Amino acid sequence: MATLRELSDFITAEFPQTRVRILEVGHRSATVAHEVGPGELRPGGTVSGPVLMATADVALYVALLGEIGLVPLAVTTSLSFNFMRKPSADRRIIGVCTLLKVGRSLAVGEVSLYSEGLPEPVAHAVGTYAIPPGGHGGSRP
């Protein structure tokens, strides 16, 4: 299992473009936050779909790496998304991920996305990650 610090350092080094930050990593779970500013908004003043999708994808990746270790070549194979309500333009997006299954070659998880501090989810995602052969217990090359 990778620690919060190891995962944060890895994401910062390997994905310097992301605005997603890791808040928590637990057993088959992760919580992340995506900062929201003018660059994340679409016309109409709502958080863009790509921001929500990126937050969900990073949450899945972090939860998986927290479980199997730093395996950089674990990749998204599917991401199904449901937009449920308009996110707040002035609050961070919080992604709460739970892995439903971690197998030898695939992992499946779900992510609920919230506008920070509000109880109702703004979106829900289900995703599958492919784990490369020998990927469990991996470390960064």
Image (cartoon, rainbow, N blue to C red):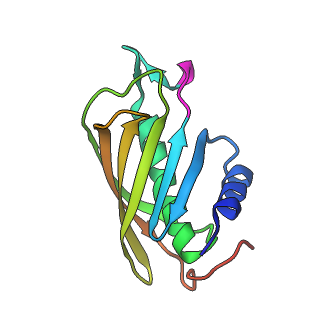
- Residue 53 covered by magenta stretch: no
Query: In the rendered image, which quarter is residue 18 located in?
Result: top right
* 1, above or below 6, in the image: below
Measured as percent of width and height from the top left, residue 93 is found at 46, 36
> On the picture, is 71 further left or further right than 122?
right
Q: Nearer the viewer, residue 25 or 48?
A: 25
Which residue occupies 45% across, 41% down? 94
Q: Name the residue rendered at 64%, 67% in the picture.
A: 3
Q: Determine the image quadrant of residue 72.
A: bottom right
Count of marks overlaid on the render: 0
Q: Nearer the viewer, residue 11 or 22?
A: 22
- Looking at the image, residue 33 lies above or below residue 118: below
List x then y, in percent, for residue 35. 56, 33
Q: Residue at x 49, y 32 (%)?
A: 92
Write down the region rendered in magenta.
35-39
Q: Position of residue 83 (x, y in %)?
A: 27, 37
Question: Is residue 36 highlighted in magenta?
Answer: yes
Quadrant of the rendering where the C terminus is positioned: bottom right
| Dominant secondary structure (helix, strand or loop) of the stretch shown in magenta | loop
Q: Residue furthest top?
A: 44
What x and y, as percent, mark residue 106?
41, 75
Q: Nearer the viewer, residue 91 or 76?
A: 91
Image quadrant in which the N terminus is located:
bottom right
Up/down of 47 relative to 130, above or below: above
Q: Is 65 left, or right, of 139 in this rendering?
A: left
Image: 5 above or below 82: below
